[in-house]
Image: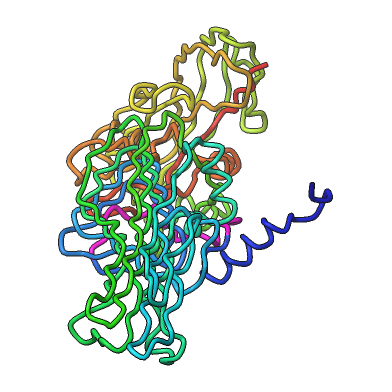
Amino acid sequence: MPVAGTLSTARRGADALSAQLGLQRSRSPADFVDLRDRRQLAHATSLVRDVLCRDLTILPNVTLTTNGHSIFCSGSFVNRGTIVTGFVPAQDLPESYGGSGGGGGARCGGAGGENGRRTMIEGGYGFSHVTDGGTPIIPSLTNDLLNQWFEVGLGMRLSGAAGGGDPFAGSNYTGTPGAYGLYLQARRIAAGRIRARAPDACDSTRCDPGSSRGGGGGGVIVLAYGEGGYTPGEYDVSGGTGNPTGCYPSGHGGDGRIIALQKSVPPISLPQIVNSAPRVRRSADCLAEGTSTIGNSARGWLTIEAGSGPFAGLSRAKNTLVVHRAETLAGTLRVQSLRSAQAPQIAPMIGTTSWGTPSTSWFTVASSVGSGSRFYDVPVKVAAPRNSGAYHVVFSFQAEPAPVYVASGTDYVVGHAEWSQHNAAAELDKVQLLDMQRYGCAIVRRTMIDGFSWFYQPGVAIKIVVL
């Protein structure tokens, strides 16, 4: 048993190998390519880190090369292009369940011929009695096991190993590389075309009968999907074929595998990545014109002035209410708005709770907030959550033609309220809620027809602490 506070030899070896392959464990937000603000991948892309996304579509004729890195989408992942996993450097991968490498054939003179590189199964024998690589048996992929693999680097658990080469023929005659694998996690997966195939020993430019390289092993594709479902794609996880023309033909690489798993809970819970938008600095920002990176069409702020019933005592200075589980909260809240005279006229105000379903938990407060200072007495009747914790009641307005666009965080040009992007008024994060309490507005992400944009959004949040 390893001593407390130290890494076991196996764990140190796994970490070292992950570092060599560029597949270190993802420990912090900096370890991810954050594509949550993008809905489409329109150009060829080669990954250098794991990807975090909400809903992402790879467009037709676009190739995404993953290089052993994983993809984590909280919503839907749709592949209409091609995913290529890339190739692994020539080394043993003793912790991987990808195909092992085929043995290298001996030279016609009887020398050379390395064994194929191993994964969890030995590589093929080299020299004159050559054998093919193999395919390991993969255990049941429980959430606990997948999290263990994530800790040491998923790529090193799913990659194929290189075939055997000819050590007497120089670097040009190393074995063919293995293929990286792929881990893809999303609520809904339309897999499309995914290639985790190792290259063949012979190609259009070289098939030298004097020295036979072994074929590399194929990678493993793991597709973990949720309640959104799974549409199978076209997969290739084949090991590379050996050289059949030499005096001692080389072995083929072992095949990878394809595994599709339906999981009610995402197997891997990812670190919280904080929004990259700047914070609100002062209340005056809420009224000012927007900047080149942050729009401000609403140009206003909101505050809580008073309340009645269970909301009695709430004000600008006091914005927290302590209640019991499932308690009925029926009363009135007085909300004050202040809006610049230069702002567009139509700006509906909505209210919503942070518990419940975002698309149904909201209600209309005003069809439009006028310029200058206005007061609204808002009747509120909700049941507190049944579980203890901290929740919020939020009031907010935005320059949109209809309240549903304010509630969903969608620009009206999209043509419909989009609820799948997780930027609804009911889903604001802790930083945004705190800014609303302090300044009367927050910087929020809104769904646009061509992606996402940041906007100042007037709002105020009442914290509901359930005992």
Residue 96 image position (x, y, % from top left): 49, 56
Image point 46% across, 36% down: which residue? Answer: 266
Image point 41% across, 32% down: which residue? Answer: 263
Q: Is 113 placed left or right of 153 in the picture?
A: left
Residue 158 image position (x, y, % from top left): 44, 55
Q: Magenta region: which residues?
A: 25-42
Q: Is residue 38 magenta?
A: yes
Q: How many marks?
A: 0
Can residue 439 be seen here? The reply is no
Q: Is residue 443 magenta?
A: no
The answer to which of 109 and 115 lies nearer the viewer is 109
Residue 377 image position (x, y, % from top left): 46, 20
The answer to which of 115 and 77 lies nearer the viewer is 115
Residue 222 image position (x, y, % from top left): 38, 47
Image point 30% across, 46% down: which residue? Answer: 77
Q: Quadrant of residue 130?
A: bottom left
Q: Quadrant of residue 238?
A: bottom left
Q: Is 188 placed left or right of 283 in the picture?
A: left
The answer to which of 393 and 85 lies nearer the viewer is 85
Q: Is 25 placed left or right of 36 in the picture?
A: right
Image point 16% across, 64% down: which residue? Answer: 61
